[in-house]
Each structure stands twice: as C-alpha cells, then as structure tokens.
Amino acid sequence: MTVLFLILYSQQYIDDRRSFPALFVGTVACIALLLTQSRSEWLASIGYYSYSIYLFHVFFTAAARIGLMHIGASDITFLFLAGTAAGITGPILTETLANKHDLLRTTLLGKKPLPKN
C-alpha cells in the first residue's frame, strides 16, 4: 500500500523541491519512527494540552511574529523558533490560568465548572 501511495503521489509533485526520492525518504522515516514505538514523557506532558494548543496557538504565534518583526527581527529561523515556543507555551499557560476560574474554564476551554467542595 505504501509503495502504491509513493508511486501515485510522486507523479503529481515532481519539481526541484519535491521529488520521488524525497517523498520516499520521508515516508520510510515516518514508518521507521512508528515501528520503533518509542515513548517520550516530555512530549506526552505537552500532549495533555493539545486541545488548548490547537485552539489558541494561532494567537500566540501571530503575536510573537508581529511583535518580533515590529522590533526589527527578520531572521526566518529565529521567527519560526520563537513562534513555535510561543504557540506551545502560550496555550499551556492559558489553560492553566483558565482552569482556575469556572467562567474562563467554560468559555475558553468548553469544560464543565469544577465541582464545589
């Protein structure tokens, strides 16, 4: 099935940036990573916040990019890394703070209020 996918998909995207060898290497690398079945506690701890990251990353990545460009940063690698960091940490902080208040917990995260003691 993978070979069929590679053959059919590579016919559409053959130019200087997209090639069959690149597609093949990327696909084999992904399959190899899946077969290793490795576990990462660090990524699992970030994954706990995946819904918040999905919802709010765009605000933090855009804010980081706009803010850094406003102060003169233009290096694409730096902007990418800063945006990635902001897009992960911002939503995690947002969820952490929103979970402390029932109104924010419900409106921002769509979660039920915490039960009263």
Image: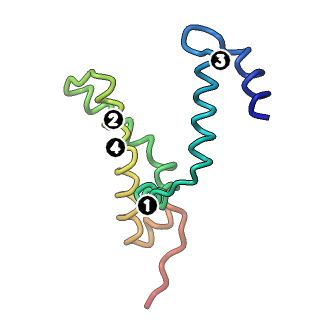
Mark 3 and mark 4 lie on one chain; the one further toward the N terminus is 3
Residue carrying label 2:
81
Residue carrying label 4:
85
At horizontal 52% and vertical 54% (from top left) the residue drawn is 38
Mark 2 packing: few (<14 Cα in 10 Å), some, or many (20+)? few
Residue 89, position as x, y percentages in the image: 35, 51
Query: Is 9 displayed left or right of 114 in the figure?
Result: right
At horizontal 28% and vertical 29% (from top left) the residue drawn is 78
Whole-Å distance between the Cαs marked 1 and 2? 22 Å
Query: Is 113 displayed left or right of 69 in the figure?
Result: right
Mark 2 and mark 3 lie on one chain; the one further toward the N terminus is 3
Query: Is 15 displayed left or right of 70 in the figure?
Result: right
Q: Are marks 3 and 4 in contact (CB under 8 Å)?
A: no
**Image quarter of the C terminus:** bottom left
At horizontal 57% and vertical 50% (from top left) the residue drawn is 36
**Image quarter of the N terminus:** top right
Whole-Å distance between the Cαs marked 1 and 3? 34 Å
Residue carrying label 3:
20
Residue 81, position as x, y percentages in the image: 33, 35
Whole-Å distance between the Cαs marked 2 and 3? 29 Å
Q: Is residue 116 above or below residue 15?
A: below
Residue carrying label 1:
41
Whole-Å distance between the Cαs marked 4 and 2? 6 Å
**SS state under label 1:** helix
Camera-side residue: 25 or 94? 25
Q: Amino acid at mark 4?
A: Ala
Residue 96, position as x, y percentages in the image: 37, 64
Q: Are marks 4 and 2 in contact (CB under 8 Å)?
A: yes
- Residue that lies at the very extreme toward the top in this rendered image: 16
Q: Are marks 2 and 3 in contact (CB under 8 Å)?
A: no
Query: Is 30 displayed left or right of 72 in the figure?
Result: right
In the figure, residue 73 lies in which quadrant? top left
